[in-house]
Amino acid sequence: MVKNLLKSAFALLLATVSYTSTAQPYKPATFTDPDRLKKIRATFPVIDQLYKKYAEDNHWPGLVYGIVVDGKLVHSGGLGYTDIDARIKADSSSDFRIASMTKSLTAMAILKLRDEGKLKLDDPAYIYIPEMKGLKYLTKDAVPVTVRHLLTHTAGYPEDNPWGDRQLAVSDEELLALYKKGISFSNNPGQGYEYSNLGFATLGYIIKKVSGKTYEQYITENILKPLGMIHTYWEYTKVPKDKLAHGYRWLDGKWIEQPLLHDGAYGAMGGLITTIEDFSKYMAVHMDAWPPRDDAEALPVKRSSIREMQYPWDVNYLTVNAKTTTGRPCPNVSAYAYGLRWAKDCDNRVYIGHTGGLPGFGSQWNILPEYGVGVVSFANLTYARAGYPNNQALDTLLALSGIKPRQLPSSAILEQRKNDLLKVIADWSKAKESGIFADNFFMDYFPDKLQAAATEAFAKTGRIISAGDIVAENQLRGYFIIKCETGNIKVSFTLTPENPPLVQEFHFDVVQ
């Protein structure tokens, strides 16, 4: 009797379901909710106050910041001065040295050269820099330093922030002399993460050896100019004086100006000078890489290579005691990618970006690819902790706007298998004849048990009202909700790698 009622209910439900796939193709990194930007804009006055308070509390001479949504700079602010003596106010067109935020542009150049077939990431670095051939590792069984090791801070070099920050103007000849003399290792290559400015200076020289141009020329011609970043510089003396941010240190209750270093071999690790307006265009490149899609390539580097840059190649920290900026406990895990930092928090939000710090400067940027939002800020105080107000800004934006992450479009085969399952769920007696199940299925699941579970579930939830859309976890796994009078039923399934894919795993759960 119950089975017949179920069959009748599903017959009515299926009559309303279209068997033409409703799956949508991948779209560029934009969202369609017309109220979304309006909700985001409403958070800006609160965010402005957060930046203002943090800058004042921490004695920042000048601060500039921007909020990027769907690849566009939609809000920016400036506080204080880029030049205290001349009283030049900071704004989104001011040029700040962004320190280690430079590293991802160096990594992007390496990936572009790889895509052009001019180098391989797993090649020993000595192929491109013969002076590295004779390096003495900690043990004789160590592997040589590779290009990938340099990209991920796993070359075995010691962390060198204080020392490296003072090497900016070093010449190529001095860099090579360091390798000729021999360097000291803290680990064998590939055996641990340690942040290395030397590693990225080395990548800059590899760009020169492979491309025939200095890393500055190659990055400018192949990344900066195509993106319209025309107010971005390597050498501070080339920046218009009324745009250049001077760097300061807060000492004994006053600001002490710090000397600016000239461009050199170590500029590949931290020498870039840019504006909020320009850098937002670079952030847009990282946003536009998502989601994967069939559109024509329109970026300086392939979208797949940008996503490869963002992948967590070297997981290095699990912070179990982490908290949000509001004090809520929220453990997170972090990793180094290629010139980028990757993190995932307790809410499953993924952050992509990087910090920057030099004598006189501090900066940071972060994007949430699945939300299509990002923040960036530059300050002209030594090692200014720019990441904290950026995190405050993102936390505030998400909390007050209530925006949701992008939902992965479901594939045609997920839609088809959903419809196939709806035909079977009410009556499992003919499931084996349906042809939609993989050869493992009926060794792991039993039709009589599945029938009993369905009968019990629908007895609890009452009359069937509708079947919801597929929520895709990937292109071969997802779930949908059957809405009923007094409860809901979640139907989850996973498909096989066969062609066409068949149902290999199935779950049927009562949910509220």
Image (cartoon, rainbow, N blue to C red):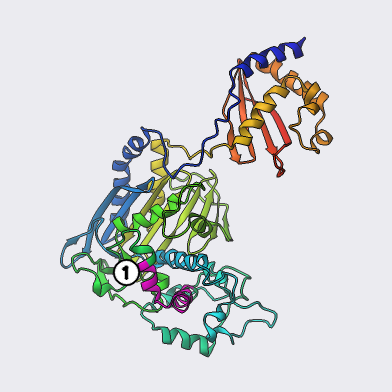
Residue at 80% over, 32% down: 445
- Is residue 295 placed above or below 470 in the rendered structure? below
Residue that mark 1 sits on: 360
470 and 508: which is toward the camera:
470
Left or right, 443 with reference to 38: right
Question: Which region is colored magenta?
Answer: 200-221
Residue at 39% over, 65% down: 222
- Is residue 52 placed above or below 133 in the rendered structure? above
Q: Label 1 is placed on what type of residue?
A: Gly
- Is residue 189 placed above or below 434 in the rendered structure? below
User: Where residue 29 sits: x, y (%)?
Assistant: 43, 45
Left or right, 192 with reference to 100: right
Where on the picture, by quarter, is residue 3? top right
User: Where residue 187 sits: x, y (%)?
Assistant: 61, 75
User: Where residue 511 sits: x, y (%)?
Assistant: 63, 26
Q: Name the quadrant of the N terminus.
A: top right
Asked if residue 385 shows in the view, the reply is: no
Check the image and name the residue furthest to the bottom: 181
In reply to whether residue 26 is colored magenta, the answer given is no
